[in-house]
Amino acid sequence: MSILRFCFLTAVFMFQEKIWLPVLDAIAGISYISRLQNLTELSRPTARKYLEGKVSLSKRRKVDAKAEENVIKGMVGEGVSEEEARSWLEAHPAYSAVSPAFQSVVYGYLGAENYPLLDMMAEKIDRAMSALFSACRENGIEHIEEAIAKLEGFSPDYMVSHDRKRLNKVDDRYDGKKNMEIFLRNACLSFFALLDLECMSRDYPEHELSPIFINLTPRVSAQLRLGEKCARGGMVLPFSSLMDLMGLLADRGKVGYWRDVPSVDNIARMANMSASEVAKIRHGDKRLSLKQFSSMWKEMVQPIKSTRPELGRLPVELYLAAVFFQVTFCGKAPSKWIDVVGHEYRYWWEHHRNVLEATPGYQKGEKSLPQWFLQNEF
């Protein structure tokens, strides 16, 4: 069911586009316009006109029908029956929501049934995006504060920055654009913090809760914090941490307990890749599409004989968090600048953890995670 994951069937407005389209490009390994061409069989110029709303209604209907036909063909080719494919497609949020970016990510990659709390949150964020877009179109960005204040289902802490550097400023007043950016940043980090908790609670209920995805946020290396000279600016990128985490999980599956992070050479050997390829991914010099990530993971766990359920499926949650953080918070030259969001992420993770622990019947895990998961320094 992977083909629809690479293209929303309805137009995505500017706020959603700013958030998700660059990430989806990285996930697919090709641009949005190319994905649209593959689905619709349009020429590139005509595909651009389609995106810009410059084709007739009758032409758009034909294009949408062709896209739907190709989606179903692709799913049938993956072993899904045509009836199942149509049912899945008709239930997709793109068929019922105005701009279902967050919901589409949950539905297309994670499964709404696996993440009920996240699915509800995604719907809430998408509704907020639609409301803010309408407000911007009608009254301009300078009046967006009024629209943000009217959003339903968001506590006041979504409207203020939790960035320590920004909080230390004496004059902390923002214009409309900055207020919009603060809300979007909080919404995105809160979204992934909740995914982190739901994933951890399901896959590792025996362990004490800890923010796992915080280790996938970009950060400054410990060596640089100590004043030591570091290669590539001393920045630890999300994909670098993702490689470490994949190695940790695969090694634990092999030996049955947590050990230290495998070396780059060992991770490369597990994944049937060269060490230079893994190093390029870690340093941001080589892209990592979902297809490539899936191939790596299959190679790493294929020889392992284990009954642990998390080894039998692709840990797409880890990849989604890493690729989102890499694309959103790291520059095109990541050795030169990154946006350190760990403190803000921790704020939202603790927010959701407090809600979860207050749920009647919730039982805490007792085992400690290995040190790698607990470093959490930025």
Image: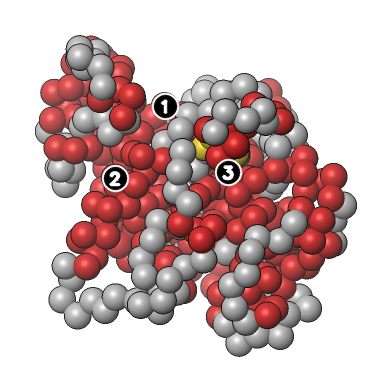
Asked if residue 289 is positioned above or below residue 233 in the image, the reply reads below
Asked if residue 78 is positioned above or below residue 65 in the image, the reply reads below
The image position of residue 36, as x and y in percent, is 63, 39
Q: Is residue 293 visible?
A: yes
The image position of residue 179, as x and y in percent, is 26, 22
Lower position in the chain sequence, tag 3 or tag 1: 1
Please identify the quarter of the rendering in which residue 127 is found.
top left
Q: Which amino acid type corresponds to the residue marked 1 in the rendered image?
A: Met
Residue displayed at 41% across by 76% down: 367
Instruction: State the separation of the CA atoms marked 3 and 1.
Output: 26 Å
Lower position in the chain sequence, tag 3 or tag 2: 3
Q: Dot 2: what SS?
A: helix
Q: Is residue 57 visible?
A: no
Disc 3 vs disc 1: which is toward the camera?
3
Residue displayed at 52% across by 48% down: 216
Residue that numbered label 2 is attached to = 347
Instruction: State the separation of the CA atoms marked 3 and 2.
Output: 19 Å
Q: Are marks 2 and 1 in contact (CB under 8 Å)?
A: no
The residue at the far right in this view is 274
Q: Dot 1: what SS?
A: helix
Residue displayed at 27% across by 60% down: 353
Instruction: State the separation of the CA atoms marked 2 and 1.
Output: 27 Å
Residue 323 vs residue 19, the one in the foreground? 323
Please identify the quarter of the rendering in which residue 40 is found.
top right
Query: Would residue 350 appear left or right of 367 to someone viewing this image?
Result: left
Asked if residue 118 is positioned above or below residue 303 in the image, the reply reads above
Q: Dot 3: what SS?
A: helix
The image position of residue 343, as x and y in percent, is 36, 39
Residue that numbered label 3 is attached to = 238
For residue 14, the mark is 1
The image position of residue 113, as x and y in percent, is 39, 70
Q: Which amino acid type corresponds to the residue marked 3 in the rendered image?
A: Pro
